[in-house]
Image: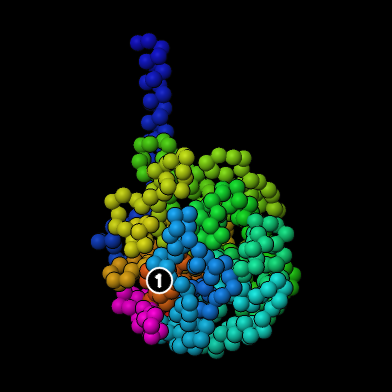
Amino acid sequence: MNRFLKLIIYLLSLYFLCIFILNVSFQNTTWNWETTNTDNIAYPDDFLWGTATAAHQVEGGHTNNNWFWWESQKDEHGQNRILNNDKSGIAVDQWNRYPEDIKLMKELGTNSYRFSLSWSKIMPQPMVFDTIALQHYSDLIDSLLNNNIEPNITLHHFEEPLWFMEIGGFEKEENINYFLSFSEKVMKTYGKKVTYWTTFNEPNVFINEGYYAGYFPPGKKDARTAGTVLGNILKAHVKTYQMAKQLNYNSDLKIGIVMSIFLFEPSNRINLIDWIGTYLADDAFNKTILRFLETGAYRYLVLPYGQPIKFLDENATKSIDFIGVNYYSHLAVNMNPLNPVESLQPVKGEELAEMGRYTIYPDGIYDAIKMTSKLKVPIYITENGIGDSKDIHRGPFIKRSLFAISEAIKNGYDIRGFYYWSLLDNFEWCLGYSQKFGLYEVNLETQERTLREGSKEFQNTVLRFSNKKIQN
């Protein structure tokens, strides 16, 4: 046997040894749902049960933010940025109908509500605050508290004032001060009444969709800009945390950040290139933020090429009292080095969710919890749900997700609350009104709210454990 042949055999052996090790070490948590008793669940008495919404998606009346502008734009092919040319408009009119919606929360049995403040309504111009908007949210908070529903406020949920976007948004570090001023104002106004605060919702989604893939405003497609924006958002998070703690309006104040956790796996498990792509996708989407919060080190890989963006913020390791986890599904990586965005595909052999971007995979919420538990802070599931206009999958998805979370609690993971996305059908960003995530179906012409049959799985579970708490 000549040396060349020996070398080939050696390299092939090494290759398949690596593939074997990767396959053995990388195993997703799964259950056989046909044989699993999903009624065998347990939750703590002080668990927060809630639903979640975002201002631009449900309030209506936004005329001065990045999404209002985006809804009238077209892409490079002349196509509308929003599916079906939908406009958010009055959305589901929660700005005016929140008393009605609080009654729906009571009907569900929930004891918390996660919602965002509209930065553009509260600060319509730089350093100018709208007293009507501030009073509106004060009234909303009081109404929630009067109904024994704990407010959980998000400061930034994809929505920014149009003027902020026009001056460069978080592309410029100096613009962080505008967000700090907004945050300080609302914390001064509501801080004594509100315990739970989230600085940013899904900054990984925000930068990937808005600065890397170009589906969200401002519609840029530049990896270095995406990395710069994410770095500045994380700096803004740390500064907001420090500012809030120094103000000390509420000794019980808890501040966190919310991450979208998507699990990634290779499309072809014997293709090393797909394994490398899986590592890169996980690092860019999940680990960049988790590593920053755990160590203070920011390292953003500029894909498909370019020097990584790096900095160190020693205050980052003490900048969260909790971590919020938004979980929906997982994705397969069929690695295309020249176009990483196109590398992400639905996992083969699984049923597609109605959104079409990913499959129905409630099992993965366990691994999302496991991943974020390394931060050693309490975990809140701040979003989990499914778009399902026919209401076929919603019930089983809820039941299986809540079982997986219960198993995580039984195994020692510190999970303090669950918020279903969403309370109501809403404006689903670039997909407009095509997606139906609501526990309550909304007739957009009459604004009538109707509890879906599949939503009763959530309602029954909440009432089951709420009644247990009352009996105790």
What secondary structure is found at the residue carrying circle 1? Answer: loop
Give the residue furthest to the left. 34
Name the residue located 36 percent from the left edge and 40 percent from the top edge. Answer: 269
Q: Residue furthest top?
A: 2
Front residue (pair 441, 40): 441
Callout count: 1
Q: Is residue 197 above or below residue 15?
A: below
Tell me where residue 250 sits by quadrant.
Answer: bottom right
User: Does residue 448 belong to the magenta stretch?
Assistant: yes
Can see residue 365? no
**Residue 75 seen in the current view:** yes
Percent across and percent down for residue 462 are: 40, 78
> Quadrant where the N terminus lies?
top left
Residue with the mark numbered 1: 433
Q: Is residue 359 magenta?
A: no
Instruction: Please provide percent x and percent y for residue 56.
Output: 52, 73
Q: Which residues are magenta?
A: 440-461
**Residue drawn at 51 percent across, 55 percent down:** 214
Q: Is residue 325 left or right of residue 181?
A: left
